[in-house]
């Protein structure tokens, strides 16, 4: 019992010390718990962090006179929110995400994906959408992993870190992992909700460098993301080269020591230097410190860095990074974040308590009535018809064209947006609030949920944390459409508790009576597709993907075909430009073209996929396996790229995988449920509603 008690003491002390260290607390002392069965108390600079300040010789935060048996042990580590939404430190950049805990390089910001990713297919072609129809175009990601095989032209709406983190060309700190696909979440043969939710669990984001507590988190979109938006605000966003150019200029005259520089660089002189730089590079001039105040800020940041690193000189890249930090809004620290931010970690995903609902949102901490559970900045779609889908047919191998003008459904995104029956406006949340499922007491308990208690939360317009919402609520739909076309957003909702919520409780809101009636009608009229044992041709891809060794040749496929939702893809190697610098030119000389223009070649080292290559749809080409050599354990594959047909021998097994066949997953099921969540009529602006005449 004593050893067990000592073990609990170690856990108690360790957890509290970790919390205090993350909050910037100082450790007074700690004795060896295994020898003394106690640890000395810990202290925190701030009483706002709810960390015990007991100064006794008992366990951390527990008086020595009180004994704790293992059965009575209570985890002393209360929930500590670590990620907050607040005004970005980049001037005029809207919201940003901040961390109050340090994140080591290589660690994920959270141990779980924040919320499902939503696949968006063929928006531009064949359905004729235009960028100005919605402002998702500046927030969605290029499809990665299995999302890229959902259709020919795929994008991915990634919540929270994928939409609310800003991009900084120098201070970038996050890299996304691909979203895992699991189509066993629902059973298309048994669940009416099949195809109505995303089967992608969402992306985790990994730190690409050490991130200090108090920093803003920055994604890496790549400079190409900016370069591909000419004629927009992107023209004025400084690139990494611009910061280095300005840093190079500074390095010629700046002295980073504690002696006074005789204030030789006043506003006039610094402004003149910036003006000179602007003649050649306006973006570099925009980050150059053109006032004494800005220069002193840069100089102080640099001196502190050099002292911390024990250096006397900083390299150009280091100076560029320090200059970038000096260009951020000052006074962004942990205390500022706690005072001005909104926690986004009060809920986390898990399997919903509602059968057939997929994932749900579960409380990580106690939440009081009226407390914000999750903030929900919104993206605008002024005309919900932008999410209509149509029948399409292939025109060539890699293009689909619309057939007729009658829509056959909607994008899955519709199910994750708020709207109103009398309005064309859709508003799509960009946080984990999309995890929250529907619940009501209507229909005599037909939609029984939350133990029959009904919803425990509601959606309402954002309060003081988003001051632009109040202004935008006064705008007309045409005004919102114009702002959307200009890439602007300005509305937010917030999910607030309507009852006391305990840790572990699932969160529910009411999607509205019209949504509920539509869902009940869908369930009543739902006809499941034919099962494989009854002659159907579909097996969940997640089940097929477990056996990536199941690689069948074209001859084997004649008698043992893959299910209709599965195909084979091969790593493109040098065909797609992934050349191996170590290869000599002999490989190129061995390429032969037959009379039909088919290229015959042996796979060289460029075809050996590595790292995350097999999760990148841009590097994978649909292929067929012609034969397998049991001696060399290599394959001969056929594939085409850019109008050229290839036959490649000696192809490695590791560079072949099973993938989804386009337009066969559950989101493409005809008649899959689609309906937006409804904003309560009491808070929906009258001037956003469309009359019958309109």
Image (cartoon, rainbow, N blue to C red):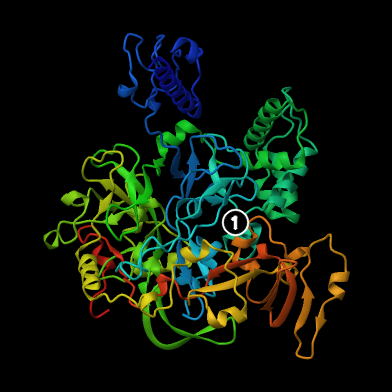
Residue situated in front as seen by the camera: 113 or 184: 184
**Residue 315 in the image: x percent, y percent?**
77, 38
Residue situated in front as seen by the camera: 396 or 305: 396
**Residue 203 in the image: x percent, y percent?**
50, 54
Q: Is residue 287 above or below residue 125?
A: above
Residue situated in front as seen by the camera: 635 or 59: 635
Q: Quadrant of residue 292?
A: top right
For the point 65% across and 49% down, the residue is 286
Judging by the rendered image, the residue that carries numbered circle 1 is 221
**Residue 428 in the image: x percent, y percent?**
38, 61
- For residue 466, say whether it is visible: no
- Left or right: 410 with respect to 583? left
Q: Is residue 259 above or below residue 404?
A: above
How many marks on residues?
A: 1
For the point 39% across and 41% down, the residue is 343
Mark 1 residue element: loop
Residue situated in front as seen by the camera: 395 or 331: 395
Q: Quadrant of residue 366?
A: top left
């Amino acid at each position: 019992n004593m050893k067990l008690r000592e073990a609990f003491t170690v856990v108690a002390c360790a957890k509290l010390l970790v919390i205090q260290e993350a909050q910037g607390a100082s450790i007074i002392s700690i004795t060896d718990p295994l020898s003394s069965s106690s640890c000395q108390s810990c202290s925190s600079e701030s009483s706002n962090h709810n960390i015990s300040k007991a100064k006794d010789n008992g366990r951390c935060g527990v008086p020595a006179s009180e004994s704790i048996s293992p059965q009575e042990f209570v985890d002393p580590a209360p929930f500590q929110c670590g990620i907050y939404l607040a005004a970005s430190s980049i001037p005029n950049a809207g919201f940003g995400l901040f961390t109050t805990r340090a994140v080591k390089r290589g660690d994920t910001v959270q141990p779980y994906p924040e919320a499902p990713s939503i696949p968006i297919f063929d928006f531009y072609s064949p359905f004729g959408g235009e960028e100005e129809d919605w402002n998702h175009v500046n927030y969605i990601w290029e499809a990665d992993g299995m999302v890229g095989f959902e259709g020919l032209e795929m994008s991915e709406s990634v919540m929270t870190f994928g939409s609310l983190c800003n991009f900084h060309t120098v201070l970038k700190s996050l890299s996304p992992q691909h979203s895992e696909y699991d189509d066993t979440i629902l059973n298309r043969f048994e669940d009416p909700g099949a195809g109505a939710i995303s089967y992608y669990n969402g992306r985790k984001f990994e730190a690409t460098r050490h991130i200090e507590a108090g920093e803003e988190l920055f994604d890496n979109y790549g400079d190409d993301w900016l370069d591909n938006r000419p004629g927009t605000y992107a023209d004025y966003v400084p690139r990494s080269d611009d910061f280095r150019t300005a840093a190079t200029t500074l390095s010629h005259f700046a002295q980073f020591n504690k002696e006074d520089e005789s204030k030789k660089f006043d506003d006039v002189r610094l402004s003149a230097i910036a003006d000179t730089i602007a003649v050649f590079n306006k973006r570099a001039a925009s980050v150059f410190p053109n006032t004494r105040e800005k220069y002193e800020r840069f100089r102080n940041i640099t001196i502190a860095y050099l002292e911390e690193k024990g250096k006397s000189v900083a390299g150009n890249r280091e100076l560029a990074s320090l200059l970038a930090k000096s260009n951020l809004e000052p006074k962004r620290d942990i205390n500022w974040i706690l005072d001005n931010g909104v926690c986004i970690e009060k809920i986390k995903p898990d399997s919903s308590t509602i059968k057939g609902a997929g994932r749900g949102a579960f409380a990580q901490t106690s939440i009081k009535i009226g407390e914000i559970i999750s903030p929900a900045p919104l993206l605008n779609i002024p005309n919900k018809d932008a999410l209509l889908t149509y029948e399409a047919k292939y025109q060539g191998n890699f293009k689909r064209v619309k057939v007729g003008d009658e829509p056959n459904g909607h994008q899955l995104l519709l199910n994750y947006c708020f709207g109103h029956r009398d309005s064309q406006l859709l508003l799509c949340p960009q946080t984990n609030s999309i995890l929250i499922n529907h619940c009501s007491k209507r229909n005599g308990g037909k939609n029984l949920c939350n133990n029959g208690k009904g919803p425990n939360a509601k959606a309402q317009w954002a309060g003081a944390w988003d001051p632009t919402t109040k202004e935008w609520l006064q705008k007309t739909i045409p005004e919102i459409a114009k702002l959307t076309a200009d890439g602007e957003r300005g509305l937010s909702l917030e999910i607030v508790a309507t009852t006391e919520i305990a840790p572990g409780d699932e969160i529910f809101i009411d999607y509205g009576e019209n949504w509920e009636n539509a869902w009940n009608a869908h369930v009543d009229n739902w006809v499941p597709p034919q099962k494989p044992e009854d002659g159907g041709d579909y097996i969940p891809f997640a089940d097929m993907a477990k056996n990536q060794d199941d690689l069948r040749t074209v001859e084997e496929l004649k008698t043992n075909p893959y299910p209709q939702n599965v195909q084979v893809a091969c790593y493109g190697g040098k065909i797609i430009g992934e050349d191996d610098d170590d290869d000599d030119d002999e490989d190129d000389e061995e390429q032969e073209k037959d009379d039909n223009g088919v290229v015959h070649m042996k796979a060289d080292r460029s075809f050996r996929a590595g790292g995350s290559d097999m999760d990148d749809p841009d590097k994978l080409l649909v292929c067929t396996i012609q034969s397998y050599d049991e001696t060399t354990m290599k394959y001969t594959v056929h594939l085409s790229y850019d109008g050229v047909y290839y036959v490649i021998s000696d192809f490695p097994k590791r560079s072949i995988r099973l993938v989804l066949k386009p337009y066969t997953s559950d989101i493409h099921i005809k008649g899959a449920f689609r309906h937006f969540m409804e904003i309560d009529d009491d808070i929906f602006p009258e001037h956003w509603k469309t009359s019958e005449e309109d």
